[in-house]
Amino acid sequence: MRLEQTMRWYGPGNDVVTLRDISQAGATGIVTALHHIPVGEIWPLEEIRERVKIIENQGLRLSVIESVNIHESIKTGLPTRDEYIEKYCKTIENLSAAGVNTICYNFMPVLDWTRTDLAYDMGNGALALRFYFRALVAFDLFMLKRENAEKDYTPEQIEQAEQYFKGLTESEKKQLQGTIMAGIPGTDEVVSNEAFKDYLDIYKDIDRAKLKENLKYFLQAIIPTAEKAGVRMAIHPDDPPFPIMGLPRIVSKKEDLEDILGFVDSQSNGLCFCTGSLGARPDNDLPGMINALGSRINFLHLRNVKLEGDGSFHEDNHLEGSTDMYAVMKAVVEEQVKREKSGRDDSAIPMRPDHGHQMLDDLSKKAHPGYTAIGRLKGLAELRGLEVAIRRNL
């Protein structure tokens, strides 16, 4: 059985890429979310069913919800977290009642992804997403001016960031701030530096151990509901997979994933295996991680990043970059074969070609960065061919 080919769709009126476009690309499943619902609030069953209907009317299936974002009170362990966990459980039940059985989420503090450039020129006119560590340090030290930020960097890193910052125009500084702030979930607004520092201050007394304990509390509270509802949860790795601006990271490497899966031993407590996020750490052995943890992978993000050194990276073509995508896909297919032989009913793991270059006709369109039609179609075609070739040679 093949992987279920999916693409992300931001919903009616919010995406220049249509369901018809996605269908023509060869995908059969849709990954979406009700982005207009405030973080922490219950997703109404009627609205979920309406989204399912819109998708099914185009001959597609709502395969995965990405994401049901987690309220900051849960991540920080505030007394109000139980109230928001109860709402989260109700959303799980409503999604199940509408026929949706896979939910992707993340547990990243404040920002659920971070880039410093949303239109990095690949040299041939195609545009990609990029994380430039020097730019992040410059923002942190000289624009945000986070208290004691200099303690997180070496003298060499600080000097390089200062030189980079001195070369920026006022327009480029504003663009850098907007790009970094784009990762705040639940809002499209660029918040002020002071407001952003208020977000960061919430985590000033929360380290890796405390954040991991709060995730454990959350999972032990929701997984029984997910099990009963027949829903598979899939935690997305940190993006990037290392601490930034003083914020801890707890979903970045194999040991982290093993801890999380051990919090609740259930297939409903699973992984979104993102080769881009995990691949941004050169010490992560992605095929080895799939071999070890593959039975708990509930969703796949297949993308490739090119490591530039010092933590910097950019999105490369899906079969190029620093990750051996052949070895990754081979490990995934071998996991599927294991599931088929053991009689599991989830061997058609949903997969999406995460991110893609803005290219060709899409260069003139205003789309969500990384989510233009043609770049993802190219990635899906390459991954589809790779999967077929590997299967034919088993």
Image (cartoon, rainbow, N blue to C red):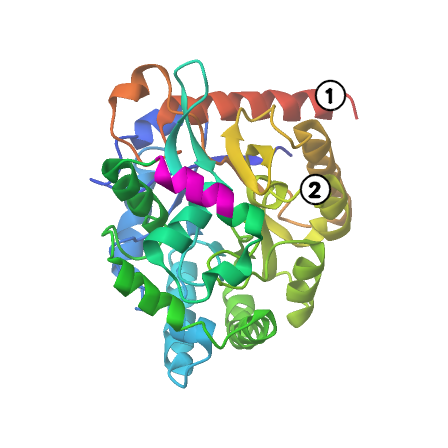
| Residue 235, image x, y percentages | 54, 57
Tell me if I can see residue 61 in this picture.
Answer: no
Q: Residues within 10 Å of mark 1 (few under 14, many from 20)?
A: few
Residue 79 lies in magenta, yes or no? no
Residue carrying label 1 = 392
Q: Nearer the viewer, residue 160 or 339?
A: 160
The magenta-colored residue range is 159-167
Q: For the residue carrying disc 2, how many other residues have a C-alpha within 10 Å: few (<14), some (14-19), or many (20+)?
A: many
Q: Secondary structure at mark 1?
A: helix
Instruction: Tell me the distance, in whole angstroms, between the alpha carbons under discs 1 and 2.
Output: 22 Å
With respect to residue 10, does 316 lie above or below?
above
Q: Quadrant of residue 393?
A: top right
Q: Quadrant of the N terminus?
A: top right
Q: Which mark is first along the chain, 2 or 1?
A: 2
* Residue type, numbered disc 1: Arg
Q: Nearer the viewer, residue 114 or 301?
A: 114
Which one is closest to the eye, mark 1 or mark 2?
2
**Residue 100 seen in render:** yes
Q: Which mark is residue 286?
A: 2
User: Residue 152, image x and y in percent?
Assistant: 54, 59
Amino acid beneath label 2: Leu
Q: Residue at x 55, y 77 (%)?
A: 217
Left or right: residue 103 compared with residue 261: left
Residue drawn at 43 percent across, 13 percent down: 124
In the displayed structure, does residue 175 sit left or right of residue 338?
left
Residue 176 rendering spot, x and y as whole percentages: 33, 42
